[in-house]
Image (cartoon, grey):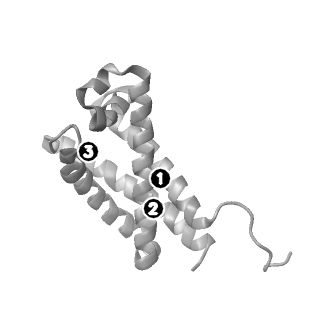
C-alpha cells in the first residue's frame, strides 16, 4: 500500500474535537445525574435553564432536547478549544493526563463562575463542600476524556 495515498475518513483534529466533545459531554450528563440523584431529563432541563430560565422545567421534551443539544455543543466547543491550545502547547498533548486535569480545573472555574452567572440562571452555584468536590471531579474526568482524544489526534495525525 502506498503511504503517500490520501487517507480516507475524518481529519484527526476534527475527530478529536467531535468524538472527545460528545463522549465527555455524554459522560458529564451521567455524572451530573449521579451527583444530584436526578434523572438525565431533569439535568437536560437544568442545562436549558441557562437560556430559558425556570420556564425550562415546564418545557417538556422540547426544552430537554435543547438542554441535550446545548450540552453537546458546549462540550464540542470546549474540546475544540483544548485541541487548539494543544496545537500551540504540544506538551499538553504529550503529557495528556496533566493537560486534561488542568483543563478540567479551568472548565470547572469558567463554567461555574463565568458562564452560569452570565446565563439566565444568573448566579454561581452554591455548593456544599461535597458537591464542590463531586463537581470538580466530574470536570477533571471531562478534561481527561477530551485530552485522551486530543492525544489520539497527536498519534494519528502527527503535526
Q: Earlier in the sequence, mark 2 or mark 1?
A: 1
The picture quadrant where one finds residue 10 is: bottom right
Q: Earlier in the sequence, mark 3 or mark 1?
A: 1
**Residue sitting at 40 percent across and 42 percent down?**
71
> Toward which corner of the image does residue 101 lie, by quadrant?
bottom left
Question: Residue at (51%, 68%) from the top-left corner?
Answer: 151
Viewer-nearest of discs 3 and 2: 2
Question: In the figure, residue 131 lies in which quadrant?
Answer: top left
Secondary structure under badge 3? helix
Q: CA distance from mark 2 to mark 1?
A: 8 Å
- The C terminus lies in quadrant: bottom right
Q: CA distance from mark 3 to mark 1?
A: 20 Å
Q: Is residue 14 left or right of residue 102?
A: right
Disc 2 vs disc 1: Cβ atoms closer than 8 Å? yes
In the image, which is nearer the foreground, mark 3 or mark 1?
Answer: 1
Q: Earlier in the sequence, mark 3 or mark 2?
A: 2
Q: Callout 1: few (<14), some (14-19), or many (20+) C-alpha neighbours within 10 Å?
A: many
Name the spot of residue 60 as percent of width and height, x first: 39, 20
The local crowd at label 3, few if under 14, some if 14 to 19, many if 20 or more residues have their Cα within 10 Å, is some
Residue picked out by circle 2: 80
**Quadrant location of the N terminus?**
bottom right
Q: Which mark is residue 134?
A: 3
Amino acid at each position: 500500500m502506498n503511504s503517500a495515498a490520501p487517507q480516507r475518513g475524518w481529519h484527526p483534529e476534527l475527530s478529536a474535537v467531535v468524538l472527545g466533545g460528545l463522549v465527555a459531554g455524554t459522560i458529564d450528563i451521567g455524572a451530573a445525574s449521579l451527583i444530584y440523584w436526578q434523572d438525565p431529563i431533569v439535568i437536560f432541563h437544568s442545562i436549558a435553564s441557562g437560556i430559558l430560565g425556570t420556564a425550562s422545567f415546564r418545557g417538556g421534551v422540547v426544552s430537554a432536547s435543547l438542554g441535550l443539544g446545548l450540552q453537546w455543543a458546549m462540550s464540542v466547543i470546549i474540546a475544540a478549544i483544548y485541541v487548539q491550545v494543544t496545537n500551540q502547547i504540544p506538551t499538553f498533548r504529550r503529557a495528556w493526563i496533566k493537560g486534561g486535569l488542568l483543563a478540567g480545573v479551568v472548565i470547572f472555574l469558567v463554567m461555574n463562575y463565568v458562564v452560569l452567572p452570565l446565563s439566565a440562571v444568573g448566579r454561581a452555584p452554591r455548593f456544599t463542600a461535597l458537591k464542590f468536590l463531586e463537581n470538580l471531579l466530574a470536570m477533571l474526568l471531562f478534561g481527561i476524556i477530551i485530552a485522551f482524544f486530543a492525544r489520539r489526534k497527536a498519534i494519528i495525525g502527527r503535526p
